[in-house]
Image (cartoon, helix red, strand yellow):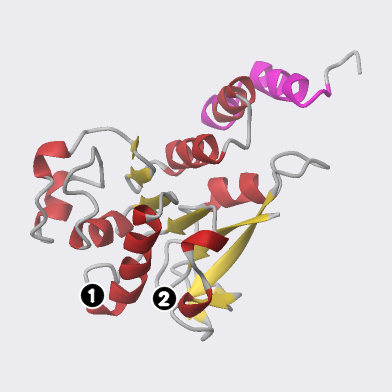
């Protein structure tokens, strides 16, 4: 069982990684993805999410490393322009250097810009101006898309939790291409046909 690490911090936007971590932890009833989600804090002090949830981190930053992780997920929060997040940004740089994916949504993209991780990669965010304050050198690589994956660095807008999840799941290889598109279509459109396709992809068709 490989670990996917979700960084948790005060004011984190708890809904933004929701689609991704739910499907990582349990892609389908009775089906294992081969991964488990573990929360990571600066230390093990409980944090308070934007939605008012108290989260006690499973691990502290000092306990994780690229060799023991399949991915680092960074949710949005109010603190990514603050130096208090520098320790996790240093860890993110270590992960990227080691070829381990890092996925950031909303304000966490500002953190990646501050760390220099978006200087030479296609990326997106809530809007281009959000990243300008970081002083980064990647403005020419900004694309107006809901979510982007460039060489294992995933970025997404705050309105694109589902698109963010699709890229995270694709990078981890949890679903087949057919199952992933059915899963995305189901949550995006509510089309019952997508549910049938998803069931069939997991071997639970009507004739089974």
Q: Is residue 132 left or right of residue 173?
A: left
Distance between mark 2 and mark 1 Cα atoms: 12 Å
Q: Report the magenta residues as a range.
A: 185-204
Q: Secondary structure at mark 1?
A: loop
Sequence-wise, the earlier of marks 2 and 1 is: 2
Q: Is residue 128 magenta?
A: no
The spot of residue 156 in percent (x, y) is: 34, 44
| Whether residue 5 can be seen here | no
The quarter of the rendered structure image containing the C terminus is top right
Label 2 sits on residue: 10
Q: Secondary structure at mark 2?
A: loop
For residue 92, above or below residue 55: above
| Whether residue 185 can be seen here | yes
Which of these two is toward me, 186 or 197?
Answer: 197
Q: Residue at x 46, y 37 (%)?
A: 167
Q: Which mark is residue 82?
A: 1
Q: Nearer the viewer, mark 2 or mark 1?
A: 1
Which of these two is toward me, 33 or 97?
Answer: 97
The spot of residue 18 in percent (x, y) is: 54, 52
Residue farthest top in this picture: 207
- Dot 2, crowdedness within 10 Å: few (<14), some or many (≥20)? some
Q: Is residue 208 left or right of residue 157?
A: right
């Amino acid at each position: 069982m490989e670990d996917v690490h979700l960084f948790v911090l005060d004011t984190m936007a708890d809904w933004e990684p929701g689609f991704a971590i739910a499907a990582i932890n349990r892609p389908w009833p009775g089906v294992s993805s081969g991964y488990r989600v573990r929360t990571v804090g600066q230390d093990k002090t409980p944090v308070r999410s934007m939605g008012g949830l108290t989260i006690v981190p499973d691990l502290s930053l000092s306990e994780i490393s690229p060799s023991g992780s399949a991915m680092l997920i960074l949710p949005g929060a109010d603190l990514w322009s603050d130096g208090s997040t520098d320790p996790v940004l240093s860890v993110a740089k270590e992960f990227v250097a080691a070829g381990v994916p890092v996925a950031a949504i909303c304000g966490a993209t500002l953190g990646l810009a501050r760390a220099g991780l978006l200087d030479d990669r296609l990326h997106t965010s809530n809007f281009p101006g959000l990243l300008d304050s970081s002083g980064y050198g990647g403005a020419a690589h900004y694309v107006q898309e809901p979510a982007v994956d460039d060489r294992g660095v995933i970025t997404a807008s705050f309105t694109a939790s589902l698109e963010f999840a699709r890229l995270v799941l694709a990078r981890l290889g949890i679903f087949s291409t057919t199952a992933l598109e059915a899963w995305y279509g189901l949550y995006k459109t509510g089309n019952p046909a997508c549910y049938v396709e998803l069931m069939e992809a997991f071997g639970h068709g009507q004739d089974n």
